[in-house]
């Protein structure tokens, strides 16, 4: 059996959206699962809308997701001679012909067909006239007028099309540029693609493409048409349902493995398992477990899954992804060990990397900025004695670890008769400027003796000045 060869052929007319990323992912996973090859191809024959900016955006998104390719990228605009050679083969074998019908004549044909209650289409009037090539001639495929074309779809099962409903579709424009259906078939044949996984919005193109395969005497690939991704209102996913671009999720602080995990679950399942590592997805992915119903995109589920992936990730992995967010907040080149210790205190409480970066900022600020409400509530005169006593106890500790930090708080509670919460909240504001943060002992351990004592002394001075 030949190795599986899949492909992802985006049109570079915009960013890589969620639906396109899922298509790329399914093809990539199946190639990796089977030990096959994954091909990247840019379908850029729409020269007016295709841009290098979009090409770069697609590469950037795929690379962030970790979807690598074995062959390519290929560009259709660089393969026009290949298409023309195959078009000539179709002409030479009587499977295609030149058509000089004017657009207004074709529109009239379609209107007449509608009036008769038939499917609007070209009526084939140039089919047997053996027109010569000319500047105004398009090339049409000579489709069969009887019989059926059946897609043996891995996901949807057999799909039957009546050939008499397929018109003689254009395969080459009058300017010599090939049409989509011709170019994609020639690409897949010449690139050895034997498995086509794509959205089910392509189903109506497939019978035309199958007829081209037959006319070009090429074997058919396996077809798997995947249901669309819908919004929560069951309408086709669009901007109003949330971010559409893959890189928008990167910029909002999502981990690539979390986005991969969520996208693959939009239409594929493996029992009741929801959380998958990248290696698990490669090991378990199969076409047979792609569902027949559309996936519904739920931003809240993605957010929850991202939190799970943050919890499960190594500190080293999180540090790599977190640094750009810290840099945007003015924190550049943090000490790796200090950053790792800070991440450990925030890992279980952060849903996104942006949230983690904002939560970690107090660790790196030279001066703590107090939230006004927090300072007003907890920097009362009664907090001054416990903080000063805690300063003395922490300063006197020989070591500076969890046990010695806890001992300093126990001594402060015994001295003042206060419970931990009454002491911890003013201390929290003193160290972080906020009322919500990681555990107080964790914070002190990460900050270390010098920073902790400096911040506590500043808080004591602030409370004393307020009470004066």
Image (cartoon, rainbow, N blue to C red):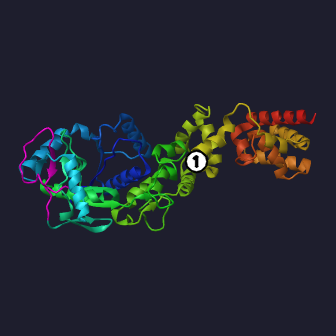
Magenta segment, which residues? 121-145
Is residue 168 found left or right of 313 in the rendered image?
left
Q: Which residue lies at the image location 78% right of the left edge and 35% below the top edge?
A: 455
Residue 119 % position (x, y): 24, 62
User: What's the residue at 64%, 41% (across, down)?
Assistant: 358
Disc 1 crowd, CA 10 A, few/some/many (<14, 14-19, 20+)? many
Splitting the image into 4 quarters, where does residue 73 fall? top left
User: Above or below — where is 224 with respect to 426?
Assistant: below
Instruction: From the viewer's side, name the closer residue of 466 and 278.
Output: 466
User: Residue visible at 85% across and 38% down?
Assistant: 392
Measured from the top left, where is residue 203 in percent x and y? 29, 59
Residue 389 lies in quadrant:
top right
Q: Is residue 346 above or below residue 454?
A: below
Find residue 404 and report its horizontal and vertical position in percent: 77, 45
Residue 221 visible in the shown view: no
Looking at the image, residue 435 lies above or below residue 228: above
Q: Is residue 276 magenta?
A: no
For the point 7% across and 43% down, the residue is: 132
- Magenta stretch prevailing secondary structure: loop
Q: Which residue is mark 1?
A: 352
Quadrant for the N terminus in the image: bottom left
Instruction: Give the camera-side residue of 111 and 347.
Output: 111
Please, what secondary structure does the residue beneath circle 1 have?
Answer: loop
Front residue of 103/290: it is: 103
> Where is residue 281 drawn, in percent x and y?
41, 57
Horizontally, residue 286 falls left or right of residue 246, namely left
Whether residue 266 sits left or right of residue 447 in the image: it is: left
């Amino acid at each position: 059996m030949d190795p599986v060869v899949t492909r992802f052929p985006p049109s570079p007319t915009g960013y890589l959206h969620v639906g396109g990323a899922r298509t790329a992912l399914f093809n990539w996973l199946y190639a990796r699962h089977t030990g096959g090859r994954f091909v990247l191809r840019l379908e850029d024959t729409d020269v007016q809308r295709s841009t290098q900016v979009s090409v770069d955006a697609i590469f950037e998104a795929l690379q962030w997701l970790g979807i690598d390719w074995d062959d390519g990228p290929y560009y259709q605009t660089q393969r026009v001679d290949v298409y023309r050679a195959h078009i000539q083969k179709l002409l030479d074998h009587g499977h295609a012909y030149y058509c000089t019908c004017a657009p207004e004549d074709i529109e009239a044909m379609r209107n007449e067909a509608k009036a008769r209650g038939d499917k609007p289409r070209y009526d084939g009037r140039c089919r047997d006239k053996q027109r010569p090539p000319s500047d105004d001639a398009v090339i049409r495929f000579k489709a069969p007028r009887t019989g059926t074309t059946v897609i043996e779809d891995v996901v949807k099962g057999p799909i039957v099309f009546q050939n008499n409903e397929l018109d003689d579709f254009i395969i080459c424009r009058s300017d010599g540029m090939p049409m989509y259906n011709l170019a994609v078939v020639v690409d897949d044949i010449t690139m050895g693609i034997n498995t086509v996984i794509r959205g089910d919005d392509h189903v109506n193109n497939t019978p035309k493409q199958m007829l081209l395969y037959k006319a070009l005497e090429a074997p058919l690939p396996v077809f798997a048409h995947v249901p669309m991704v819908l919004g929560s209102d069951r309408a086709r996913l669009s901007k109003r349902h949330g971010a559409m671009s893959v890189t928008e999720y990167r910029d909002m602080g999502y981990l690539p493995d979390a986005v991969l995990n969520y996208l693959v679950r939009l239409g594929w399942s493996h029992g009741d398992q929801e959380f998958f590592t990248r290696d698990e997805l490669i090991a378990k992915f199969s076409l047979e477990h792609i569902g027949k119903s559309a996936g519904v995109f739920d931003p809240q589920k993605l957010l929850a899954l991202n939190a799970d992936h943050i919890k499960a990730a190594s500190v080293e992995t999180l540090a790599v992804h977190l640094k750009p967010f810290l840099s945007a907040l003015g924190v550049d080149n943090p000490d790796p060990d200090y950053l790792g210790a800070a991440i450990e205190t925030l890992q279980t409480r952060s849903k996104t990397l942006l949230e983690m970066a904002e939560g970690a900022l107090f660790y790196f600020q030279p001066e703590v900025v107090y939230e006004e409400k927090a300072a007003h509530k907890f920097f009362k005169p009664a907090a001054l004695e416990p903080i000063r006593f805690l300063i003395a106890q922490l300063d006197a500790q020989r070591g500076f670890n969890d046990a010695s930090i806890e001992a300093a708080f126990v001594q402060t509670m015994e001295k003042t008769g206060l419970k931990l919460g009454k002491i911890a909240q003013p201390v929290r504001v003193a160290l972080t400027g906020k009322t919500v943060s990681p555990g107080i002992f964790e914070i002190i351990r990460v900050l270390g003796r010098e920073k902790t004592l400096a911040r506590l002394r500043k808080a004591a001075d602030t409370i004393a000045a307020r009470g004066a």
